[in-house]
Image (spheres, grey):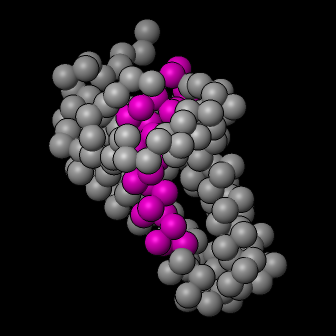
Amino acid sequence: MISTMTSMDERSAASVTRALLTRPDLYLLARWNWKSALLSAVVRSALFLRSASVQASGAEFCVALAMAGFLGAFAQAYRQVRPRWLACLMASVMPLGLLHACEFAAHRITGAPARAIAVSIVYSVLSSTVTVFLMRRGIWLAGENQTSLAGDLKKIASLVAVPGRRTFFARNVSS
């Protein structure tokens, strides 16, 4: 039987990092987030189509589709870390370095302009923060806690419909 982090461990950034390093099969592969991968690939390729070329857009779609599912799993692992700002930092900064290194390599080949990569980096930071916010509320999860895409979109719509009801660093509120 695969052991999982205890509720006490889930609050410590060190214990989550340790779990990711010792059990990437459980925390990254088994929880590869197809929702994050698909949304990221579509949005990122559209950004590159707008600011670069069809070739750069296609390369970005492939890189994002391959990498963003792991970024979603990474964010899911850190979603319960306290303090909340540390969860956002860990889910944003650490894995995005890897994503953008791969992205940079792909776009050196396609000749995409630096502004396109800069837009992608800004999108990454914002989307990672939003992803942690959603995952803290049980939305956009993969693996054993997965919910349907339709259910997630309904919950997201209800969050948007009531502005100010929740903030990124607010306590968890059950929906």
- x and y percent of residue 41 in the render? 68, 58
Q: State which quadrant residue 107 falls in.
A: bottom right
Q: Quadrant of residue 78?
A: top left
The magenta segment: 120-145
Q: Residue furthest top?
A: 1
Quadrant assignment for the N terminus? top left
Residue 59 in which image quadrant: bottom right
Residue 5 rendering spot, x and y as whole percentages:
30, 23
* Residue 110 appears in the figure: no
Q: Residue at coordinates 65% horizontally, 66% vertically from top-left?
A: 44
Is 99 in the magenta?
no
Q: Can you give x and y, in whole percent of width and height, for residue 166 in the image? A: 36, 41
On the rendered image, what quadrant is the C terminus found in?
top left
Residue 30 on image: x %, y %: 54, 30
Residue sitting at x 34%, y 28%: 173
Placement of 21 over or under 68, stated as above or below: above
Q: Give left or right: position of 4 versus 48.
A: left
The secondary structure that dominates the magenta segment is helix
Asked whether 159 or 77 is in front, the reply is: 159
Residue 65 shows in this picture: yes
Figure disc tally: 0
Q: Horizontal placement of 23 versus 146: left or right?
A: left
* Depth order, front residue of 94/155: 155
- In the figure, 69 relative to 49: above or below? above
Residue 139 belongs to magenta span: yes
For the point 31% across and 31% down, the residue is 172
Residue drawn at x 54%, y 36% is 158
Q: Nearer the viewer, residue 46 or 32?
A: 46
Relative to residue 92, is residue 62 drawn left or right?
right
